Amino acid sequence: MTRTRPFRALVVDDERLSRQRLEDLLAQADGWQLCGTADDGDAAIRAIGELKPDLVFLDVQMPGKTGLDVVREVGLEHMPATIFVTAYDQYALKAFDAAAIDYLVKPFDDERFAEALRRAGRLIELEQVGRATEQLRSLLSSSRRSYLERIAVEMRGQVRVVAAADIDYISASGPYAELHVGEKTFVIRERMQTLEEQLDPSKFMRIHRSAIVRLDRIDTMLREPGGDYAVKLKGGARLSVSRNRVEPLERWMGLGR
């Protein structure tokens, strides 16, 4: 059966020049058309749901949600054929190769792009995306997201590294975040949401819009007048807990409501 319409591709990459290169190559490819672009994980999730592309070029390393996070949130059963775009070294790429999921390593040449596109086209035409989805499921189940283990802090022209394991809690201060380590406080220019996403959720929890706490530093949970809650840390600090975070925190502490 002859295909009557071109394949539709979505390009997802947080780097403008990388997106532009993929757009230019797609414009030259017979039987393909660009249906949209996205510059972060959240926009990618929306675009995949709204545009229903046949293929997505998906950057692996993006701030906030990574490419693999996008796949998890969209759901394997709803993902189109996927070509990962990555700067991973060859050792890390073995996982992608073993799962038979195609990838492009930055910087890639025109021939490598054309090869990946041909493979994707055959996959879609033969209606074997479901098989690739199962291979992607194996990749996701075997992959472990890496979380921040250290944070670089600039102080008086010098850079100091703060280990995540040493942080008691983090508080918001306008466009800055304050890392509280014992009696010391280090200031970095970073959003709380970004830190929340990059820290290991088994060790850190955002208990308030302006506070992230290392869970093993919590000493007691307190109920304050008016039904508000707070936690007292082992070092003595007292932090407010938003009402929508009380239940997750109680579950972690093994408390029933």
Image (spheres, rainbow, N blue to C red):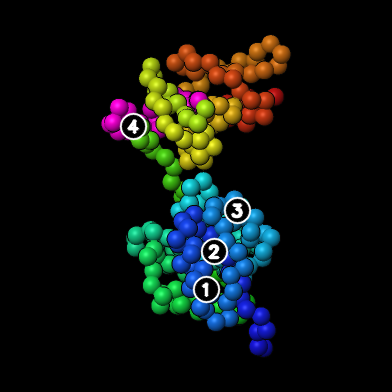
Q: Which corner quadrant holds the C terminus?
A: top right
**Was residue 168 drawn as part of the magenta stretch in this picture?**
yes
Crowd around label 1: few <14 · some 14–19 · many ≥20 (10 Å): many
Specify the label residue 43 is tagged with: 3
Residue named by callout 1: 26
Crowd around label 3: few <14 · some 14–19 · many ≥20 (10 Å): few
Q: Which corner quadrant holds the N terminus?
A: bottom right
Number of disc labels? 4
Residue named by callout 4: 154
Measured Cα–Cα span from mark 4 to mark 3: 32 Å
Q: Main secondary structure of the magenta part?
A: strand
Residue at the bottom extreme?
A: 1
The residues colored magenta run 154-173
**Was residue 83 drawn as part of the magenta stretch in this picture?**
no
Q: Are marks 3 and 2 in contact (CB under 8 Å)?
A: no
Mark 2, secondary structure of its residue: strand
Mark 4, secondary structure of its residue: strand
Specify the label residue 11 is tagged with: 2
**Residue 220 at least partly seen:** yes
Mark 3, secondary structure of its residue: helix
Marks 4 and 3, the one that precedes in the sequence = 3
Residue at image location 28% in from the left, 31% down from the top: 158
Marks 2 and 4, the one that precedes in the sequence = 2
Amino acid tagged 1:
Leu
Measured Cα–Cα span from mark 4 to mark 1: 42 Å
From the viewer's perspective, tell me whether residue 237 is left or right of residue 32.
left
